[in-house]
């Protein structure tokens, strides 16, 4: 059974075009962020971890979390979290410890080596924020407006997953 798309007037066509542009841009920005991190790490000679793993270290920060919490807290967006955690533990970027209460649950936190990588990313992101401001590309208010809009879209999508319209 095929359901036809609704007929859109000019306003709705413009909204749809903008929405599709936003979707493509969000996807491209994420991939570009990973490339920026990769290039920075190559420049610094850090070759044993990839940009996804580095971003995971950055997002965990000083927290101690379970693998399940990584996705629910928004620290990790990929599907292969177990592989990346295992790799980061093997390479000495993270500690892991089984829960005394629930032996199936493993808590992870950064080692000193992991905190150094997190610091490198924090420095990189600070340079980027400063560069955006100095070049007049976006100021604090513009950044906040973008964040609010993206949060509203995130909330809408989350509601869609939960079947709340």
Image: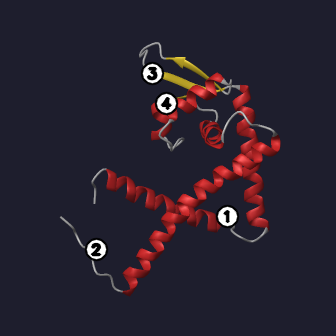
Which residue is nearer to you in this view: 146 or 157? 157
Asked if the residues shown at circle 2 and circle 3 are in contact, with their CB atoms under 8 angstroms apart, the answer is: no
Which residue is nearer to you in this view: 153 or 90? 90
Q: In the visual, does 148 lie left or right of 113?
A: left
The quadrant where residue 110 appears:
top right
Q: Is residue 164 above or below residue 42?
A: below
Q: In the visual, does 14 lie left or right of 88?
A: left
**Mark 4 residue crowding within 10 angstroms, few (<14) / some (14–19) / many (20+):** some
- Badge 2 element: loop
What residue is drawn where x is 45% and y is 32%? 68
Give the labeled residue for mark 1: 140
How far across and how far down the image is residue 131, in percent? 78, 62
- The CA distance from mark 2 to mark 3 is 45 Å
- The CA distance from mark 1 to mark 3 is 40 Å
Q: In the visual, does 51 lie left or right of 116?
A: left
- Badge 1 element: helix
Q: Is residue 56 above or below residue 27?
A: above
Choose mark 1 or mark 3, whichever is in front. Answer: 3
């Amino acid at each position: 059974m095929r359901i036809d798309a609704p007929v859109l007037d000019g306003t709705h066509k413009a909204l749809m075009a903008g929405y599709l542009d936003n979707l493509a841009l969000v996807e491209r920005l994420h991939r570009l962020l990973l490339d920026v991190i990769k290039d920075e790490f190559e420049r610094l000679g850090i070759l044993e971890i990839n940009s996804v793993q580095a971003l995971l270290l950055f997002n965990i920060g000083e927290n101690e979390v379970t693998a399940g919490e990584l996705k629910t807290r928004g620290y990790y967006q990929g599907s292969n979290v177990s592989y990346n955690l295992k790799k980061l533990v093997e390479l000495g970027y993270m500690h892991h410890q089984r829960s005394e209460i629930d032996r199936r649950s493993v808590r992870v936190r950064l080692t000193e080596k992991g905190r150094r990588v997190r610091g490198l990313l924090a420095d990189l992101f600070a340079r980027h924020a400063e560069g955006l401001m100095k070049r007049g590309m976006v100021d604090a208010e513009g950044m906040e407006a973008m964040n609010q809009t993206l949060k509203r879209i995130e909330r809408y999508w989350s509601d869609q997953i939960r079947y709340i319209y």
